Image (spheres, rainbow, N blue to C red):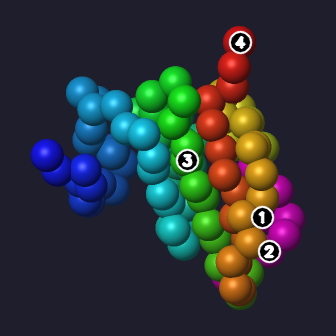
Amino acid sequence: MDRIILHQCQEKDIGLSDVKVDFALAFYMVHEVPDRTRFLRQVADLLKPEAYFMLIEPNHHVSGKQFDQILGEVNSVGLQLIKPVKTFGSRGMLLQLETK
């Protein structure tokens, strides 16, 4: 059974509408997405109810203010911060779908 599926998105669409995942990772790329809210909504739609989404952005390219803006966009699509993720030279967060 394959446990890890690598998938390259199109510029404006993830392209995985029929898949549900346990974990998604966006590493050093969310700041490059033209429509971040659309992207984050698509990621949220892919997550199983107990799944996690880890988002990591580089300190040298994404300011604290920009990262806070991304966090606001994350909240607007129904994802909640579980805990900050500390990695060298980066800002990160572990997220999950909001529980109702």
| Mark earlier in primary sequence (3, 1) | 3
Q: Dots 3 and 1: beta carbons under 8 Å?
A: no
Q: Give the vertical position of 66 relative to 23 (above or below).
A: below
Residue assigned mark 2: 63
Q: Secondary structure at mark 3?
A: strand
Residue assigned mark 4: 100
Q: Dots 2 and 4: beta carbons under 8 Å?
A: no
Q: Where residue 96 sits in the image (x, y, percent)?
A: 63, 37
Q: Give the vertical position of 96 relative to 71 (above or below).
A: above
Q: Which mark is residue 53?
A: 3
| Mark earlier in primary sequence (2, 4) | 2
**Quadrant housing residue 86:** bottom right
* Residue at the top extreme, as displayed: 100
Q: Give the vertical position of 71 relative to 8 (above or below).
A: above
Mark 2 to mark 3 CA distance (whole Å): 21 Å
Residue 38 visible at all: no
Depth order, front residue of 26/62:
26
Span shown in magenta: 61-71
